[in-house]
Amino acid sequence: MRSLQKTIAIINSFSPDKPELTASDIASGLNIPRPTVYRILSILTKAGYLEKKAGKGTYVIGRTLYTVGSLYLTTTDLYHAAEPIIQVINDITGEVTNVAILDDKGYITMLLREESKYPLRHVVHVGSTSPAYAHASGKALLSALTDEEIDQLYPEEKLKQLTSKTVATRTELKLELEKIRNSGTAFNSEQAYDGVEAVASVIRNASGNAIAATAIAAPVVRMNEEKRKRFASLIKIGAGLISYRLGYQDKTQPIHQVADLYTWWQQHQQEAILQPDVNVNIKI
């Protein structure tokens, strides 16, 4: 049992902040004797759960562990509830649609993704992780937390910059989250990647807890104020439909069938033509 606990602790040592570790890093971080660490690392490497980088002496997560972890996607209710919705949204918009979850370290992990139908696209693979505060889906999920929980996730006032437009401080982030709570949608323009913007909305389970977020992402060159407004409405309806399929009861959700998204979108398009002067105020 003690050996199993040490093995689990070694695997859990790897994180988005520390994707590569040496045996010495692990031994000192966990206060486990170095010979024991080497023995466990050898077993995990042979099994494919870890890989040793040639010439560097560092270890990274292996393909076997990734494969085992990816089984989560095919067994979770979230996968079955969300997959058809993001496929329809992708079909309607032609843009990237995805679903991400938030971990207890302030990072989001992408669970599902439908690629853009356009040649110009930004590719991010399923399973990738990134600081939540830099992404629309991450900010949507962070908006479900209290200020105290935000402080625990990000104890430093200054936040690491991914681009020149990434939210710079925890105080600035909290102000943005308050706006997201009021609107139900989160925007991001070039805060995670240069030239890419996104809009997201939170997904809730039957208990009303925020468990994921879904987003539409597109190159800045294909976006404008009218399209932002329409995409914001669409992703909010889509997230609401996924939540409904998970058992969440929201009386304001207008549709309950996947196919109804197409009808709703057509009606929404006609309404937008009749009201072309409506603007979406977002921070660019």
Image (spheres, rainbow, N blue to C red):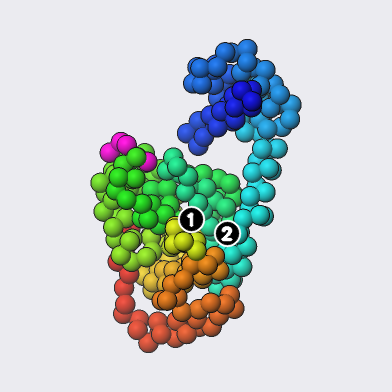
Secondary structure category for the residue under label 1: strand
Quadrant containing the C terminus is bottom left
Measured from the top left, where is residue 175 in percent x and y?
A: 26, 53
Q: Is residue 7 magenta-colored? A: no
Tag 1: residue type? Ile
The residue singled out by tag 2 in the image is: 78
Instruction: State whether residue 114 appears in this view.
Output: no
Residue drawn at x 64%, y 25% is 1
**C-alpha distance separating marks 1 and 2:** 9 Å
Secondary structure category for the residue under label 2: helix
Q: Which residues are magenta?
A: 153-157
Q: Which disc is residue 35 wearing?
A: none
Residue drawn at x 62%, y 55% is 76
- Who comes first in sequence, dot 1 or dot 2? 2
SS majority, magenta:
loop
Tag 2: residue type? Leu
The residue singled out by tag 1 in the image is: 211
Q: Report whether 49 appears left or right of 116.
A: right
Q: Determine whether 88 is above or below 214 in the image.
A: below
Measured from the top left, where is residue 60 in percent x and y?
A: 61, 30
Q: Is residue 154 magenta-colored? A: yes
Asked which quadrant contains residue 57, the reply is top right
Residue drawn at x 55%, y 80% is 260
154, 274: nearer the viewer? 154
